[in-house]
Amino acid sequence: MYSELQITIPSSDFDKDVSVPSFSTDSDNIYTINLYNMTCTCPDFSKQQRGSYSKDDVRRMCKHLMRKYEKDIGLQGVSKFGRYILNHEYSLKKNIRYTNSEKLKYPVIVNFNSTDEWWYIYIRQEKEKDEYSRYGFFPGASGSWYDAKPFGIASELKLKIKGIQKEIKEQEKQAIEQEKQAAKKRQVEAEKFTSEDAPGAIGCFIVFIILVVLLFKACG
């Protein structure tokens, strides 16, 4: 796991279910969270499959877990990136990639689920109190920044992000091809097994019929 994503696992003292309200102003839903188990009953937790991450991975946390974690446990031992994420309650997406720029001192963190959804770009700032800035990017045909864009490096990062997108699509293409080849191999093996097994099955059936006939004759 990336060190930027690591958090401290709560002790068993926090192994209790707690009710929390929905953050949406249009909803009266109440969700149940458990800090020790790092679970929540909200739609984001299940939809984003957050339970598939380890309990010390910040990607496991929905906004409800983030707020409760920061309030009850604090941010000691959490990385600068993790503190930024928890402070702003930014629920992370599944994939993490890194890229860089000669104009930046630190690597750029690229966060996304798939190549056809919005990506988030995190750039660490050297002098600002907030330490990171987040930018939205949609890697469509032309690629576009949402609202604000990183000053002075937007075009450069755009090309690098498109490169990451191309790499991911190639990996997905290879995975599909590998699955096709595996399925074809399974089919060939199944057909081979059937063809080899058929004569034996027919022979057993004939022997069975003969035994039945002999039995009837004996009884007669």
Image (cartoon, rainbow, N blue to C red):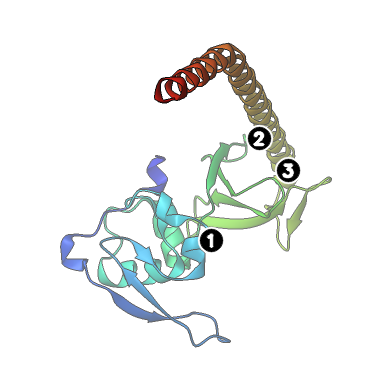
Residue located at (41% from left, 46% from top): 4
- Please, what is the three-letter code of the amino acid marked with disc 3? Lys
Q: What is the secondary structure assignment of the residue under circle 2?
A: helix
Residue at the extreme front:
220
Tell me if residue 125 can be seen: yes
How many residues crowd around disc 2 within 10 Å: few (fewer than 14), some, or many (20 or more)? some
- Please, what is the three-letter code of the amino acid marked with disc 2? Ile
Q: Residue at label 2?
A: 168
128 or 106, nearer to the observer: 106
The numbered disc on residue 47 is 1
Q: What is the spatial separation of the Cα atoms under label 3 and label 1, in whole angstroms? A: 29 Å
The percent coordinates of residue 57 (x first, y second) are 38, 50
Q: Earlier in the sequence, mark 3 or mark 1?
A: 1
How many residues crowd around disc 3 within 10 Å: few (fewer than 14), some, or many (20 or more)? some
Residue located at (39% from left, 58% from top): 83
- Please, what is the three-letter code of the amino acid marked with disc 1? Lys
Q: Are marks 3 and 1 in contact (CB under 8 Å)?
A: no
Q: What is the spatial separation of the Cα atoms under label 1 and label 2, in whole angstroms? A: 22 Å
The numbered disc on residue 158 is 3
**With respect to residue 4, does 30 lie above or below?**
below
Q: What is the secondary structure assignment of the residue under circle 1?
A: helix
Q: Earlier in the sequence, mark 2 or mark 3?
A: 3
